[in-house]
Amino acid sequence: MHAPRNENEARPEVVYLDNNATTCVAPEVFEAMVPFLTQYYGNPSSAYSFGKLVEGHLIQAREKVAALVGATAKEIIFTSCGTESDNAAIWSALQTTGKRHIVTTQVEHSAIMNQTDRLEMMGFGVTRLPVQPDGTLNLADVENAIRDDTAIVSIMWANNETGVIFPVEEIAAICKKKGVLFHTDAVQTPGKIDLRHVAKSDINFLSMSGHKLHAPKGVGVLYAKKRTKVLPYVIGGGQERGKRGGTENVASIVGLGRAAELALERLSEEQTRVRALRDHFEETLLQRLPHLYINGKRDQRLPNTSNIAFDFVEAEAILMRLDRKGICASSGSACTTGSLDPSHVLSAMGLTPARARSCVRFSFSHYNRDADIDHALEVIPPMIEELRAMSPLGPEHTDNFAYDVTAAREKEEKLMAQTMAAINE
Ligand code: PLP
């Protein structure tokens, strides 16, 4: 809706605070892509020079992406998205080892959650590790969950809802000691965490996605460590050194190469300016409003992510009102499917269903300015006060908040059932 801004530009109509959902394409990225959508449309696998020229740019992009994780170009496989990279890593491990058990966590993205659910239905074994109330993992649980028939351990680097970071390099070392492959879904990390030591670690597979780091949607990366066997998930031509069939999405890959360079250049800014924006946002809200909780271990989170419980208010009501004020944020709940289920991540952390349904995620980026945060801070406190004043779950119910909300929801569901029955009669 709005182009990325220069330093001094005023606040645009839309204040985008949902950068963990997707990000704007950086102008530099767009510029790098255009020639490959217009002039240089050759197929990189073609033998003539018009194709070879394109292949040369593909090689350069591969090197730039490899630099992000301190790897060599040969360890980079381009895919269509983070989801495909996740699915491909798990599938390859099952195929190459012939083993039938996977260890993962209860807080993974649906790319892993739903794939492992499906694998379980197909007869594979899956262990889903719990997390602590602050969203962190107990490393002993990982070690204890590994069995003789474990093919792979897959644990995300940072959680997309809370930003909580897992010690994946330590986990990878445990897996190596036990002779098991390790995959990490690192989709939320480039440009936020320094990944340049990945290739020196014991991580076998790592997933990334273009649209989370200011490259376009529809391009992903699977890093596969040297000497880790890879069988293609998408089977076709011999592209990507036989590890992923399908003609490469050249323009997006070139864009991703540029985005990888920018992510490295801006890493320290993310860890200072963007972190300061996030911290100021949280501190101000905590000062202005009672009954607010920050989810996830505060000093073990991505610098750009804030997940806040606004007790006594439904996140959906907050999001609708924020939308009317031009502010984009999101809730981890499965609201898009029309389900009333609270977020699986927050539930795994032990939040009551009522509190989990009151949580909103704000995620910031390089393109957010002080004016965006000021606007959000101007809008949110009176909005929450107003919603709380209207809520039947007001602060006077603090002690039995969960009980009251459950009762209210049951009543609501009963009413809905009665209405539906009346309609169907
Ligand atoms: N993994 C995580 C942690 C994510 O946050 C996302 C996207 O939200 C994905 C995987 C999926 O990436 P993509 O949208 O590129 O398929």
Image: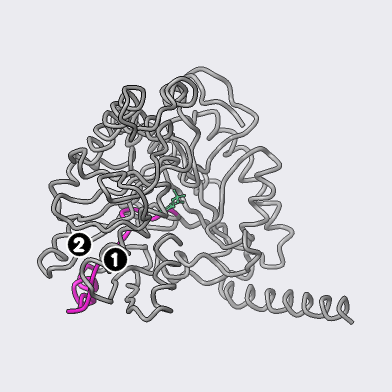
Q: Secondary structure at mark 1?
A: loop
Quadrant in which the C terminus appears: bottom right
Q: What residue is shown at x 24% (from left), y 57% (from top)?
A: 230
- Along the line of sight, the residue nearer the viewer: 113 or 365: 113
Specify the label residue 171 is tagged with: 2
- State the mark number for residue 115: none
Q: Nearer the viewer, mark 2 or mark 1?
A: 2
- In the rendered view, would you say 420 is above or below 137? below
Residue 131 location, x and y as percent?
Answer: 34, 69
Residue 53, quarter of the rendered image? top left
Can you say which quadrant of the picture contains the N terminus? Answer: top right
Residue 1, compared with residue 380, is above or below; it is: above
Task: Name which residue lies at 82% across and 76% down.
Answer: 420
Label 1: few (<14), some or many (≥20) within 10 Å?
Answer: some
The segment highlighted magenta reads 139-160
Which comes before the other along the chain, label 2 or label 1? 1
Q: Is residue 150 magenta?
A: yes
The answer to whether the residue labelled 2 contacts the one labelled 1, judged by CB atoms less than 8 Å apart, is: yes
Task: For mark 2, give the secondary structure.
Answer: helix
Q: What amino acid type is highlighted by mark number 1?
A: Leu
**Amino acid at circle 2:** Ile
Judge by depth and name the residue closer to the eye, 217 or 18.
217
Measuring from the top left, give residue 332's x and y in whole percent: 52, 58
| Total count of labels | 2
Q: Position of residue 362 (x, y in %)?
A: 51, 46
In this figure, which residue is indicated by the disc labeled 1? 137
Which quadrant of the figure has residue 324? top right
Which residue appears at 62% of the width and 59% of the height?
336
Against 96, is 319 above or below? above
